Amino acid sequence: MSAASELPVSVSEAAALFADLSEAPVLILAVSGGPDSTALLWLAARWRARRTRGPKLVAVTIDHGLRKESAREALAVKRLAKKLKVAHRTMRWVGKKPSTGIQEAAREVRYRLLAGAARKAGARHILTAHTLDDQAETVLFRLARGSGLTGLRGMGRLAPLPASGQRGPAIVRPLLSIPKTRLLATLRSAKIPFADDPSNRDPRFTRPRLRELMPGLAGEGLDARRLASFACRMARADRTIESAVDQAQARLSRTPASGAIVLAAGFADLPAELSLRLLGRAVAQVGNEGPVELGKLEALHAALAAAMDQKGRSARFRRTLAGALVTLADEITVERAPARRSSANRRKGAFTKPR
């Protein structure tokens, strides 16, 4: 570990991290009370205190009610926020908790509550404390689950908040280039206490297990910074491919009055990655059963390619995916699939032939 990775984040560095948010009227800070989010609160408050005007800072703590210490930790955040002259709200997850998939459910609730807090405060941005280490873990997590190139981009600094969609508040990750060690050094230097959540080390969950692998991987040269660099390169490549898909879509796709999307015969001449993504866009736009899974999309794409002759035609091809019906005749048509006959059929999955 280099000496630089142990240095506190300086005033000038923090100013650069938050510079593009200077004109925002309100910023929501997601602060759990752990070291990373506590550092975010401290750095943002110090940055704001040196400015003559705006933005207003509002720290929001989500109490999931999953640990007996959570209420006390939320109160500690409230006290620190008051000391730093930052407004604070605690929002609680009430109601029955699921017996499985608890982390995924907690994440969904957390973003939903943060979105509500942002709307109430008139904020367009929600700041989270994801670090360079979190970026590395995300890349490993997605790689282990077979993500494609888009997933291996990792997290971006700016993204739509999952619970609110494209038109809701944006999530901002100003600390994404900062290693966790520097945030800890920042808190030690400022003598700021923070909470310790033992679930971050619970081997029942995937991310703590990946976290345990990091020192060994770093010993082989695959440290957090190198994984983050890999994510940046994947993002660059992904943007290039998406630009090519934009051009192919403008040339080959049209939307008739029926609302279906028609892909021309030139679809067969595209490189496989471009035609795969073009098909995926059409399915996502027309379908109504949620995100398109890459593996299922690849299976559909392969079946479609096998059905096409050199002229891009086939006697008959019909498949459904994610609520979209894909038909091949003279052209490829993607339209809303007929409603399934029963909820049991709906649970079987989207990649089935319609009856």
Image (tube, rainbow, N blue to C red):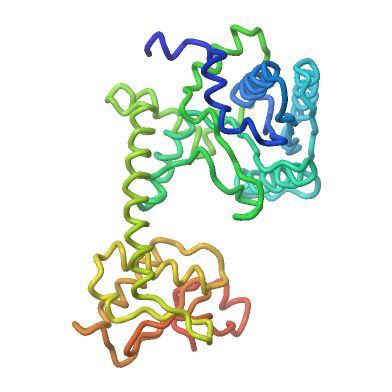
In the displayed structure, 15 sits above or below 205; it is: above
Q: Is residue 248 left or right of residue 90?
A: left
| Residue at left offset 73%, top offset 43% | 118
What is the tally of numbered marks visible in this picture?
Answer: 0
Q: Is residue 138 left or right of residue 221?
A: right
Q: Position of residue 136 (x, y in %)?
A: 42, 33
Could you tell me residue 320's position as x and y percent? Answer: 46, 78
Identify the image quadrant of residue 15.
top right
- Above or below: residue 68 compared with residue 316: above
Front-most of residues 74 and 168: 168
Q: Residue at x 35, y 50 (%)?
A: 238
In the rendered image, which quarter is residue 76 located in?
top right
Task: Report x, y in % for residue 229.
Answer: 35, 33
The picture quadrant where one finds residue 304 is bottom left
Q: Nearer the viewer, residue 62 or 347?
A: 62
Viewer-side residue, 332 vs 98? 332
Q: Nearer the viewer, residue 293 or 212?
A: 293
Quadrant (top left/top right/bottom left/bottom right) for the N terminus: top left
Residue 196 visible from this viewpoint: no
Q: Answer with left or right where residue 44 lies relative to residue 332.
A: right
Q: Is residue 243 above or below residue 77?
A: below
Residue 127 lies, in percent from the top left, at 62, 34
For residue 279, side relative to residue 28 (left or right)? left
Residue farthest to the front, as pictured: 52
Residue, x 72% and y 32% (percent of image)? 67
